[in-house]
Structures are given as C-alpha cells and as structure tokens.
Amino acid sequence: MATERIRINNEIRALELRVIGAEGENLGVLSLSDALAAAKRAGVDLIEISPSATPPVAKIMDYGKFEYERSKKEKVARAKVKVSETKEVQIKVGTGDNDMALKAKKAAEWLSEGHRVRAELFLKGRYKGMSEEFLKVRLEKFLTRIPYAYKVAEPIARSPKGFAGVIERDLQAQAKREKEIAGAQKDETKI
C-alpha cells in the first residue's frame, strides 16, 4: 500500500490553508506565511493533512508524532483485513470411515477460521466409469459429516480429477446450531 508523501512546512504549495491548531482548535483560513509563523511560534511543524480539500487543510503538530499515529492507524487497518484461502480436502471412493471423520474435522477447522473448503472426490482407474449419481452421493455423504454449519458456494460438479464442490461457513446457521447444542446440554444436566 503506497502512501502519498505528506508535505510539511515549506513543501506546502497552497497559498491559503484551513489551519487546525496544536490543541485541535480551528484557526480558520490563513495564508501560508501566517500558518508557518503560527507553527513556528508553537515550536512544531505545519503538516498538510488534506491536500485535495478547498482550501487544503493543514495541522500544527509535531511531524514525528503525526507519522507515528498514522502508522498505528495503518497497522490496525491491516490487522483487520482477513485473508481467506480456499483449502482443499480430497477423498477417494475407498476412503474409510475414520479417515473421512478426520478429514471432516479438519474441514470444520478451516471453516471456523473463515476459509472456503473445496471437497474433492478423486477418481482413478476403474472408478471413473462408475455411476455419476453414486459418486455425487459419496461426496455429499462426506459433506454431511462436517461438524460445522456451511453453505454451498459451488455445487458438486465434475472436475478434472473427479467430482468437487466448494463450501463456505454460514455464521448464522452455526450460531443457531451452537444454541441448540447448549440447550441440549442443559437438558442433560437436569436429568
């Protein structure tokens, strides 16, 4: 993210500026020379914070403090951006129940982290000639084992390696599911 170079003191080109004082007070529209003089009296810099405004807005404050605050704001903004990936889980026609349960658990972890999951039924050899309905049901059976609420982003369809579908988390359905589980646990403790 390239940040625009901030103009300070004598780098400012505008002849008139709307100036904000060192204490945050509005000093009004001043000429560049008056604004520079006010900054010099305060012993800090004149920083152009909004060059595209009419007239441009400048603030009287220490440039080092201004840069520090700006970098903190950018860091917080970057931290809030969540990168979502598409994770892939692959099963085969002969995958056993325990392996399916482990892969379903891993897919649920990925969904809870906010990632999309591409579930693929890998076919090789003679399995490619099997009934499409049987193969789709096999993949759907795996998806029903995932212990996390999800919605279908891309329905199950033929892929180069077999059949695949993409799912993503459904926060509302998951919250509802967690409430139901909590309610069931309260009922069991009463017995």
Image (cartoon, rainbow, N blue to C red):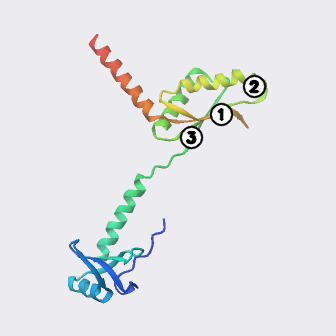
Q: Earlier in the sequence, mark 3 or mark 1?
A: 3
The residue to which callout 3 is attached is 87
Q: Report the residue at 50% width, 38% height from top.
A: 110
Q: Which of marks 1 and 2 is nearer the N terminus?
A: 2
Q: Residues within 10 Å of mark 1 (few under 14, many from 20)?
A: many
Vertically, is 77 above or below 99?
below
Q: How many marks?
A: 3
The residue to which callout 1 is attached is 164
- Describe the element under mark 3 as helix, strand or loop: strand
Vertically, is 43 above or below 64?
below
* Gap in angstroms between the C-alphas marked 3 and 1: 12 Å
Tag 3 and tag 2, C-beta contact below 8 Å: no
Q: Report the residue at 42% width, 74% height from top.
A: 52
Q: Is residue 61 visible?
A: no
Q: Is residue 60 left or right of residue 88?
A: left
Tag 3 and tag 1, C-beta contact below 8 Å: no
Quadrant location of the C terminus? top left
* Gap in angstroms between the C-alphas marked 1 and 2: 15 Å
Vertically, is 113 above or below 26?
above
- Locate residue 96, reporting x and y percent: 61, 22
Q: Report the residue at 39% width, 62% height from top.
A: 74
The residue to which callout 2 is attached is 127
Q: What residue type is labelled 1?
A: Ala
Q: What residue type is labelled 3?
A: Lys
Q: How crowded is mark 2: few (under 14 residues within 10 Å), some or many (20 or more)?
A: some
- Locate residue 59, reporting x and y percent: 29, 76
Identity of the residue furthest to the top in this view: 191
Q: Can residue 84 be seen in this view?
A: yes
| Res. 41 mark | none
